[in-house]
Image: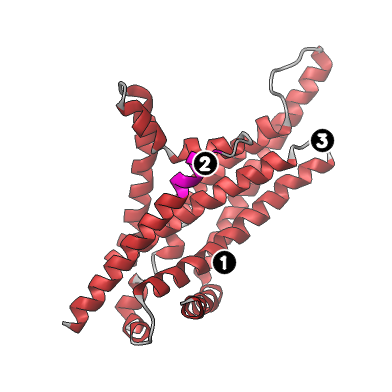
Amino acid sequence: MIRGIWAVCERELRSAWRQPIAWVVLAIYLFAHGLFFVQLVEEYSALSFQMLTSGRSLPDFTLVDRVCRSLLVGDTLLFILLLPALTMRQISEESRSGTLDLLMSYPLSEAQIILGKFFASGFVVWVMVCLGTAEVMALGLVGHLEVDVVWLGASGLFLYGLSVLALGLVFSAWSENQILAFAATLLAQLLLLLIGFWGIRVDPPFDAVLRYLNFTGHVGHFSYGVLRASSVFFFVGLIVFYLYCASALLARRRWHEES
């Protein structure tokens, strides 16, 4: 089981770094992340100077409150836009080119194929989160930084990124058109984002249900240094459910081709 997953993962990693898509996603993320980071730091520096000259103070005026949490919100939106590009080709393109039939002819189960592809794209997201977090950690050289809160926020962002990848695999297994798989994943994430906004406006008991489905709220818990079991279970549950759906769609495709 593990050997088969590792074989698929290794194959996907080699393919991802040979093709431009992983490099393009990584470059766009680091560029946008860096721009937002510089803007937030400049605003923090300007407010610090104003407070120093005026003698007044602002509540919750720390690097984590003013820079890190806002940056985490920006990174979440970037993941919505960028991560579907990592998964849109993993099954759709292989199905169109015919290499998926060759892969499925090996003694591999649908779950092994899906998990191998998921772990490969998850490694790319792990690199993105680590590089972005390293940039934030540099703030500790110029001011007080709550390192544990920063790393907990990064962990929440990584879990969210994995859930986007798992959802992307569902649509990649569903459609042979990688553009359609990208668009469907993006629209599904935007719909989940809207559900969170609706949770503020509806009446009980539906407001609690919609708020729980709001992934930005769960990422926000991590950014405040709060490790909630409900948030961890939310992301882990989504990942397992999406991966199961992707495996079922791949099994259905194999069944149709064999019949």
Q: Secondary structure at mark 1?
A: helix
Tag nearer the camera, 2 or 1? 2
Would you identify the image quadrant in which residue 104 lies?
bottom left
Q: Residues within 10 Å of mark 1 (few under 14, many from 20)?
A: some
Q: Which disc, if any, is residue 143?
A: 3
Q: Earlier in the sequence, mark 3 or mark 1?
A: 1
Q: Which residues are magenta?
A: 228-235
Instruction: Identify the amino acid type marked 3.
Output: Gly
Residue at point 48%, 35% (across, down)? 217
Q: Secondary structure at mark 3?
A: loop
Residue at point 80%, 13% (across, down)? 54
Q: Above or below — where is 257 with respect to 134?
A: below
Instruction: Identify the amino acid type marked 1.
Output: Trp
* Residue 248 falls left or right of residue 157: left
| Residue 167 at x, y percent in the picture | 38, 56
| Residue 21 at x, y percent in the picture | 50, 67
Q: Which disc, if any, is residue 229?
A: 2
User: Pointer 1: what residue?
Assistant: 23
Residue at point 47%, 57% (across, down)? 83
* Residue 55 falls left or right of residue 59: right
- Quarter of the image with the C terminus in it: bottom left
Q: CA distance from mark 2 to mark 1?
A: 34 Å
| Residue 206 at x, y percent in the picture | 30, 28
Q: Nearer the viewer, residue 88 or 120?
A: 120
Q: Residues within 10 Å of mark 3 (few under 14, many from 20)?
A: few
Q: Tell me if residue 65 is in the magenta stretch.
A: no
- For the stretch drawn in magenta, what is the main secondary structure? helix
| Residue 75 at x, y percent in the picture | 56, 46
Would you identify the image quadrant in which residue 195 lies?
top left
Tag nearer the camera, 2 or 3? 2
